[in-house]
Image (tube, rainbow, N blue to C red):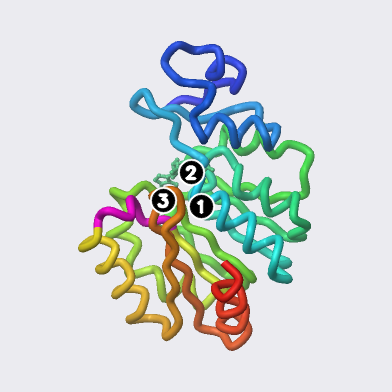
Amino acid sequence: MKTLQLEEALRSRKFSFLSPSLLIAKELGLKYVIVEKNSITGPAIGLSIVVDKLTKNLPIKSMMDLCCGTGALAKIAYRNGVEKIVCIDKNINAAKRNLNGKNIRIIKADILRFKINEFFDLIVLDAPRGILPKLFKRFEEFLRHSNIFILWHGSCEEEEWNKSVREILRGVSNTVYSFSVYGEEISAASSTKKGVRWLKKFYRKW
Ligand SMILES: C[S@@+](CC[C@H](N)C(=O)[O-])C[C@H]1O[C@@H](n2cnc3c(N)ncnc32)[C@H](O)[C@@H]1O
């Protein structure tokens, strides 16, 4: 995994300057992106749109960005007026540089072990697909510490896998909505009265 200057990525022959992650990074004014195995790790377009719409349309005051990578989702929330933002990743080089000067807490931690001891209106999880099964047992904890918990879980074509992620969520929450956005499957869940009300309103207008 390496942190690359956005300008360098935009000029590189390896990537197209029209790739969604680079376009989003540019729009958000990020200076650094993350490259792993010759591809840009994020931000994903579908999840970026969902975070933008959620933080623009609901009175969300606090957000935790789990596996924040570049910090793009935190920056979207910050732009939309979210007051308290906490970012977690095992590699915080890019987020630290991209979010420099903003009132955003950035914590270097392993998501598999990190304990949450605050409550947030929104918790976003954008973990690599490969480690998601190890995080299933933590979904209940993410829900207990938020009004809304959302996660990216892969391509919308992977029906069986997506169904199983939704089932895990339904096991710990009575309200689960799923969104297919630009080919990405994203689920949102809540276990609080306020979160359920917010999600219903959001889903009706989606
Ligand atoms: C898909 S990327 C997230 C992209 C991010 N949302 C963005 O906008 O740039 C996945 C992130 O998970 C992080 N990650 C992977 N395993 C992790 C772990 N065990 N603990 C914390 N972060 C982890 C990686 O460092 C990477 O930044």
41 falls in the magenta region: no
Alpha carbon distance from label 3 to label 2: 11 Å
Amino acid of disc 3:
Ala
The residue pinned by badge 1 equals: 47
Res 8 → quadrant: top right
Q: Mark 3 to mark 1: distance in Å?
A: 12 Å
Q: Depth check: give the residue in front, 125 or 110.
A: 125
Give the mark nearest the N terminus, 3 or 1.
1
Nearest the camera: 66 or 190? Answer: 190
For ligand 1, which image quadrant applies?
Answer: top left
| Image quarter hosting the C terminus | bottom right
Q: Quadrant of the N terminus?
A: top left
Q: Nearer the viewer, mark 3 or mark 2?
A: 2
* Label 1 within 8 A of ligand 1 by Cβ: yes
* Relative image position of residue 125 (x, y in whole percent): 47, 57
Question: Mark 1 Cα within 10 Å, few/some/many (few <14, many 20+)?
Answer: many
Under circle 2, the secondary element is: loop
Quadrant of the rendered image containing residue 153:
bottom left
Tag 2: residue type? Ala
Instruction: Kindly tell me whether mark 3's CB lies below 8 Å from ligand 1.
Output: yes
Residue pointed to by mark 2: 44
Residue type at mark 1: give it.
Answer: Leu
> Disc 3 designates what residue?
127
Asked if the residue at label 2 sits under 8 Å from ligand 1, the reply is yes
- Label 1: element kind: helix
Residue at the (56%, 38%) spot, across then down: 70
Residue 153: say if magenta. Answer: yes
Asked if the residue at tag 1 contacts the one at tag 2, i.e. Cβ–Cβ closer than 8 Å, the answer is yes
Above or below for 43 versus 138: above
- Residue range corresponding to the magenta coloring: 152-158
